[in-house]
Image (cartoon, rainbow, N blue to C red):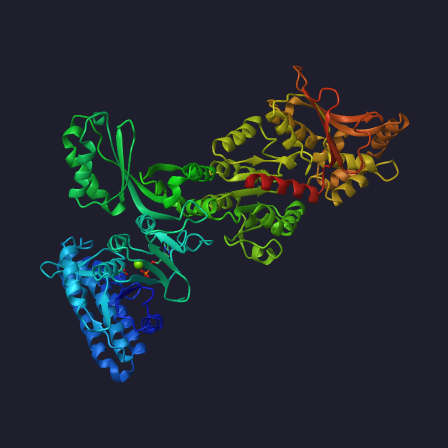
Amino acid sequence: MQVLKFGGSSVANADSINKVLAIIKSNNNKKVVVVSALGGITDMLLNSATLAEKADEGYKTQLKDLEERHLEAVKKLIPVQQQSGILSLVKKACNEIEDICNGIFLIGDLSARTKDRVVSYGELLSSQIINAALNNLAIKSEWVDARKLIVTNNNYGMAAVDFIATDKKIQEYFLDNTSNLFLVPGFIAADKSDITTTLGRGGSDYTAAIIAAAIDASFLEIWTDVSGMMTADPRIVSNVKHIPEISYQEAMELSHFGAKVIYPPTIQPVMSKSIPVWVKNTFAPQAAGTVIKNKVAENDSPIRGISSINNLVLISLEGSGMVGIPGFSKRLFEALANAAINVVLITQASSEHSICVGIEDAFSDKAKTAVDKAFEYEINIGQVQPLLLEKYLSIVAIVGDSMKNHTGISGKMFAALGRNGINIRAIAQGSSERNISTVINTADVKKAINILHEAFFETAYKQVNLFIAGLGNVGQKLLQQLKLQEQFLLHQYRLQLKIVGIANSKKMLYKEEGIDAESYRTELENGTAMDIQELSLLIQNKNLRNSVFVDVTANESITFVYKDLLQKSVSVVACNKVAASSAYLNYKLLKNTATEFNSLYLFETNVGAGLPIIGTLNDLLKSGDKIQKIEAVLSGTLNFVFNNYNGEKSFASVVRQAQKEGYTEPDPRLDLSGTDVMRKIMILAREAGEVLEMEDIQNNSFMPESCMTGTVEDFYASMEKEEAHFKKIFEAAKSAGKKLKFVASYLAENVTQKAMVGLQQVDDKSDFYHLYGKDNAVMFYTERYPTQPLVIKGAGAGAAVTASGVFADIIRAARV
Ligand code: ADP
Ligand code: ASP
Ligand code: MG
């Protein structure tokens, strides 16, 4: 004999019930079919009863809707001529529900017993309707009231089964019964006095397992709305993988820790008889599904699945009086058991100072009262503190039989969570080593499950979520480069860089499923108004794993959110120089925040655009080298200007050309004044360990004072007026056979003037002499490179190279 159970979504309406009928009809084997209430009906019944209890007449509308749904199912499933019997049955049941609710409304009281009575109608109705639909198809089936089969205690809402009495009744009923098909309402049972009880939410699975075990069924089929058990809840993780086989113990752990696909107690009865369980999809009956059985093949990952439970409260009993005295835990658990509070998780500090237990939020008040009462004496004399409660927590558990044969799994789990700033409040590992559970804030659950899923199952690729602010020259080039490299990174590095947020100065757009780097424009135009604080909050609230904020603006206000983001373990990649060149304390604070919260603050493009200058400096220092001196030409703009200025075209027009070609800051005065170079040498000196501010840097500016006031256009006009000044500088160098370079230097030795910038005439023996176009060059003189410096040279400005430097930082932040 087979037992088949169809869940609420499988019997939600006439269309899905027709699918159920087809599955039942597909063979002639003798079978028991257990059904849930029509999807959502149990909630509606509970809701109606609760409204009635609160004297809210809204229950009447709920009940009308409920009746409507059942009548509609009947009308669609059964031809008019055959409807009358089942229609009157439905109407009668609905009247009874209404009578009970009216009673609740009048007395304003809803007992657990009455609640069970009310919800039982869900399964009673669905099973009778499906039975009638089968009979209508001339398939003979026998409706059996589960209350005549399953005997429980009277713990209403979650009644415990009396297996001896139950097995006997089931066997007596089915074994000599010649009918070939039975229809049984799931979830409901009765106590010894024939009062209706229920087996706990989701309990229809359990009904089916109890029957399967009692009659030694060849297997149990659980028909639901997913094609078997998955490596995580498909509503939380989009890349879930199908689990073809799973052991009873693993399935039990996964469901205990929240995998709703199977109601936890379901496994026990079938496991005791080694009856395999198939989890199948009513809406895709051909799909393989999952088989739950004794021995299963190992899979690629040492873990089988990840699950989570929300609404957890950690209760802690703490106090010096607990040390070394046996019996404290016993009394705590006794107090909880006596109050019928289910313990989900236990941890105890080895100091024995505290025991910490996870329970469902619904039991918080009860637990507080019960435990404080049990320890009243110890609390009064100060040996133990009153029970502490921490709310809004969840458990995330990884489960797998073969975890015990693998080392480093918990390390991998905690490292992955830690890297993403997920705070772990408590940890438990069963001695069977079949699960490791962590307690975290509920707000972090989705992120945590996705991180763990990626770490344990998606060797295929790692997803990094990018938020890009700034869509100017560099921003647009960056988007193009991201698009071009998409496939390469996916295939070669298993890295998926997903742009989930973009913003320009006016608008911002967020799309968790990803923004196309080519066709984002219209969508962005329809986005919300750009507000950097809001964007920062959104990034923090969305709490996506591996988040990276990319600042390709030159805007100071954007830098104000770096710290908050770094604190939430969101890495920051900035081509914006404002933060790294702000007050030293701010620069240091950002660096320290990143270290503390395991995020990265990367700004390679602040110096030399895409050239690997900061990275090289860091590598030298990390490997033990010491910087003695840095000499550098760090302004692509100034280099371009002096390489192109030969006294023929005006100096101003060469600067204008540099701006047009995108080699200047948005305000070119920052380049021409030497301020930008000062910022860069300061950043390098700071990275080398120097505490330096802008005012500590000497700037031997070549610009006449008169050029530096007014608007950018005033600036160009005054440069035209000063053409003679620029020409003089040029001619002086030319006549000496030298070239003009704007050089920055930093000296590590103990001198008063550590850093300076200024225009120099260089001869052909200098490494800077042969710098063309917009090139930059940096010379590091170090302990290991004392006389012949380590030189980095190449284009130091331009949107494409800057974007590629930002891109390289993003890859660094992805930590692949
Ligand atoms: P039914 O109404 O058939 O009893 P449930 O809603 O109780 O169905 O259970 C099926 C649901 O369980 C799926 O739709 C899915 O969202 C959820 N679920 C949670 N964890 C898992 C998992 N690991 N594998 C499959 N489904 C899961
Ligand atoms: N109808 C019940 C519930 O919604 C039992 C079940 O569906 O398994 O909890
Ligand atoms: Mg279910």
Q: How many marks?
A: 0
Q: Which image quarter is the N terminus in?
A: bottom left
Image spot of residue 278 (x, y percent):
34, 60
The extreme bottom residue here reads 81
In the rendered view, would you say 407 is above or below 218?
Answer: above
Most extreme residue toward the left is: 193
- Residue 326 image-quadrant placement: top left
For residue 616, above or below residue 267: above
Residue placed furthest toward the right? 735
Front residue of 553/410: it is 410
Q: Quadrant of residue 291?
A: bottom left
Is 229 or 406 nearer to us in this picture? 406
742 left or right, relative to 379: right
Q: Position of residue 799 (x, y in %)?
A: 69, 44
* Residue 287 in picture, x, y percent from top left: 42, 64
Residue beneath the point at 67% across and 34% down: 612
**Residue closest to the eye, 325 or 116:** 325
The correct choice, above or below, for 396 with respect to 740 in the image is: below
| Left or right, 487 with reference to 439 | right
State whether residue 59 is above or below residue 663. Answer: below
Q: Residue at x 21, y 66 (%)?
A: 121
Whether residue 699 is visible to the viewer of this picture, yes or no, is: no
Could you tell me residue 437's position as x and y percent? 35, 41
Ligand 2 appears in which quadrant?
A: bottom left
- With 756 as the anchor, is 391 left or right in this view? left
Residue 16 in sight: yes
Is 537 on the left-hand or right-hand side of 342? Answer: right
